[in-house]
Amino acid sequence: MSFIGKNIKKIRTVKKLSQASFAELFNLARPSVGAYEEGRAEPKIDTIVQIAHYFGLSIDLLLNKELTINDLYKFDVIVGDRAGTKLADKDEETNPMPPGGIALVLLDKYLEYIVNYQNKDFISKLRKIYLPVTRKEKSRAFQLSGSEMEYNHNGLHHGDILLCYKIESLTTKNIKKGKVFVVVKRENIIIRRVTAVSKQIEFSSDDPNYSSMYLDTDEILELWEVYGVYSTYLNPPSTVEAKILEIENDIREIKKKLK
């Protein structure tokens, strides 16, 4: 028995999509969506593939398991403006979104964010991510652009999601040396590590092939300290980690011989 119909309805209600909005996403007729949800018909395989890909789900999960809220919220970017989607119609059953959420600035929103970073209405319309973490500080998430913070396949990678809290007072004493920051400037948004703090702040890449950048505090529109990272990239072990692993294996072999 396929769960595709129930799962389409669950996705719609959680994502706050009307049947018409869902149909528009996948070039379907609105009555077809109703037929899927009521079990009177099933979508074609290419439509199933599109739905799975769009919402970041496996086809197996979509077909063979009734989705839970956790399945849909797990490090998930909640649909807001992905394809001009509309809120569900008032007469349709909907589940309210969880309160809160962290506003996410994707790569294609960088320039808009620089212009509108103080615009509360703009911030409220950014996509949200919901994570099992709470901080008292004001939080925001940024998608990393570029490979300046990656070296020898380690570090932060292009496309990673950086969880940040805001440095409210831009004084040098509040900026910690060694920490990674998202720096919002008038020209662009950069992600760098602070390597020195004096009259100017030195921001450096983890890749030594890039030169350092020196900024005064009045050149910075916003400064966000990175406290967490969501990445789909698995970093290889560092040289130190590899050595420790080698030593642990040697100790195990010695213990076996002693026994």
Image (cartoon, rainbow, N blue to C red):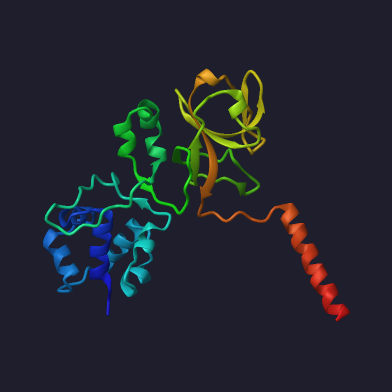
In the image: residue 142, left or right of residue 180: left
How far across and how far down the image is residue 182, in percent?
A: 51, 34
Residue placed furthest toward the front: 136
Q: How many marks?
A: 0
In the image: residue 228, left or right of residue 152: left
How far across and how far down the image is residue 14, in percent?
A: 28, 57
Question: Which residue is at 30% across, 39% downward?
Answer: 125
User: Which residue is more in the foreground, 73 or 8?
Assistant: 73
Question: Which residue is at 65% across, 36% downward?
Answer: 178
User: Where 80 sits versus 52, above or below?
Assistant: above
User: Which residue is more in the foreground, 31 or 89?
Assistant: 89
Q: Quadrant of residue 56?
A: bottom left
How far across and how far down the image is residue 138, in percent?
A: 45, 37
> Can residue 240 be seen?
yes
In the image: residue 194, left or right of residue 111: right
How far across and how far down the image is residue 70, in percent?
A: 38, 62
User: Which residue is more in the foreground, 186 or 90?
Assistant: 90
The quadrant of the image that shows the N terminus is bottom left
User: Where 68 sits versus 78, above or below?
Assistant: below
The quadrant of the image that shows the C terminus is bottom right
Q: Quadrant of residue 12?
A: bottom left
Residue placed furthest toward the right: 258
User: Which residue is more in the foreground, 178 or 96?
Assistant: 96
Question: Which residue is at 38% across, 63% downward?
Answer: 71
Question: Which residue is at 22% across, 68% downward?
Answer: 43
> Can residue 213 be seen?
no
